[in-house]
Amino acid sequence: MNAIEIEHISKNYKTVSAVKDISLSVKEGEIFGLIGPDGAGKTTLFRIMTTLMLADAGKGRICGFDIVKDYAQIRQIIGYMPGRFSLYQDLSVQENIDFFATMFGTTLQDNYETIREIYSQIEPFRKRKAGKLSGGMKQKLALCCALVHKPSVLFLDEPTTGVDAVSRKDFWNMLYRIKASGVTVFVSTPYMDEAGLCDRMALIRQGNIIDTGTPAEIVAKYPYALLAVKGTPMYPLLKELRKLDGVISCFSFGDSHHLAYDPAKTQKENILAAAVAAGFKDCTAWEIKPGIEDCFMQLSEQ
Amino acid sequence: MSTELDTNSSYAMEIRNLTKKFGNFTAVDNISFNVRKGEIFGFLGANGAGKTTAMKILCGLSRPTAGEGTVAGFDINNEQEKIKRHIGYMSQKFALYPDLTVRENIRLFGGIYGLADPEIKAKTNNMLQTLEMENVRDKLAGELPLGWKQKLSFSIALIHGPEIIFLDEPTGGVDPETRRRFWEMIYEASEKGITVFVTTHYMDEAEYCDRVSIMVDGRIEALDSPAALKTKYKATNMDAVFRTIARKAQREE
């Protein structure tokens, strides 16, 4: 049985259609990523799947339970960490955890093993008010509260937004340990570099799923040849490369430009020669494999 | 340090021994650096490293506990109002008025910065043309797509012709293409001689800066061009450099 199964879900707010006919399925025990920018419809989809909002059309099941009819059962078996910190700021760390445990008819002691690893990092501050914690600590507390009742499926809405590169890595290591304990993880992020860390993912844009699959499957579908190009100065080079025949797109990617081209019309040597002829210095170009970000940009063009 | 306006200085910012304490906590711990005119300067650091506190001082919104320096030629200790008038600022959060139209937003911010009506009119026309937003001039700013909102915020932050623009995580949560188009606007501004001071959590964007500083526990742990930092830390990209340096952090946010 799939942990999550949604079919043809749509949701409109007045004139804005936030989610358009979305279907996807998540296998038990996997980390599934919903990858897309702000305003793509990620949070709306979360609210529908966690039974906090009704869809205008479509149906869905979480661990076999219907998202409309069986909302009460679903709420017992899922953990949900919204994008905005939503614990009680004026309760202590300990009180927040006790509160959520009690709501689910359990105790911290009963499920201590589930959250031990994360909880041990905030235990020294257990008497501190949640509102007085640092961002990283708040996040760990929220995760403890979402896990205290041993959920089957954990929903995390943009847990790493605005978080620095080091803390993001740490957070993903925590997710792997949660997955190892058998929990299905459904996580959203606007950071494309996190896409490669998921077992499977859906790319979402303007309310539509533009692709879905494992990172390798998505990358394999990339339709163009791709080069990394470097030369000095970089920004004028970018503008020059875009003008060349056979070049489909060109964008900055860290210290090089990624250039998608049509191999029927041009090749690496032509592109490199054109850059040199235009007066750019230290030009180099090499064939590369696309990343998820290249794919996302290519799929967005359509 | 002289507090006279030194128009011949090749620096847009000169900061010496800047420190900010809150009670016993030293948020910014004796940092010194210069930013060259026209440079794209990346101001990096882990959450809680002290970036926001430092940036508030540089923007004239907070006074240092100790240290001195100039921003756009004005003293950070006693010319804060002048600093505010000579810098632009844009944050990740959309800070235009969503229920005013595009044109009304431009007029409002032009007015706040003390531009005269004819000047505002000319700037408005010019801006709408450059941004290719003439046909949405009477649309509510809140209803624009994210990429357009950003372009508009960026241009409005430059409406009073500041020498320096501060960009606080300008591309957070933005789609990959819009993020790159935004950086192209930064390059264009830099080519016109505007100094750009920018923070980001995207390490590929660190590569686009002329120089970057990396803050750890209130101090500047590294400051150089991305190429030099990669050589020094034997790393293939800035992500690896950042992780090596930021791992040294001892303090909690």
Image (spheres, coloured by chain):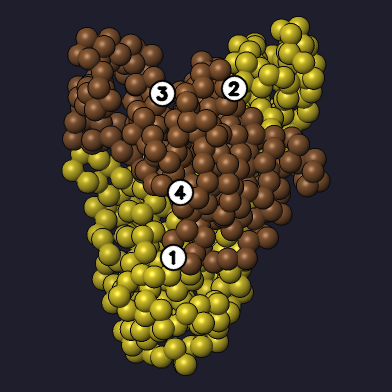
Crowd band around label 1 with a 10 angstrom C-alpha radius: few (<14), some (14–19), many (20+): few
Supply the letter of whichever chain is yellow.
A
Question: In the image, are marks 4 and 2 on the same chain?
Answer: yes
Mark toward the viewer: 2 or 3: 2
Question: In the image, are marks 2 and 1 on the same chain?
Answer: yes
Q: Residue at x 47, y 26 (%)?
A: B4
Given contact means CB atoms under 8 Å apart, are the residues at marks 3 and 4 in contact? no
Q: Residue B119: name its quadrant.
A: top left
Check disc 2 and give the amino acid type: Ser
Lower sequence index among marks 3 and 4 = 4
Supply the letter of whichever chain is brown.
B
| Residue B143 drawn at (x, y percent) | 25, 34
Q: Is residue B196 left or right of residue A253?
A: left
Lower sequence index among marks 1 and 4 = 1
Report the front residue among B213 and B127: B213
Q: Which residue is mark 4?
A: B64
Disc number for residue B23: 1
Check disc 4 and give the amino acid type: Pro
Q: Residue at x 52, y 46 (%)?
A: B67
Q: Which residue is mark 3?
A: B162
Mark toward the viewer: 1 or 3: 1
Crowd band around label 3 with a 10 angstrom C-alpha radius: few (<14), some (14–19), many (20+): some
Q: Which residue is mark 2?
A: B10
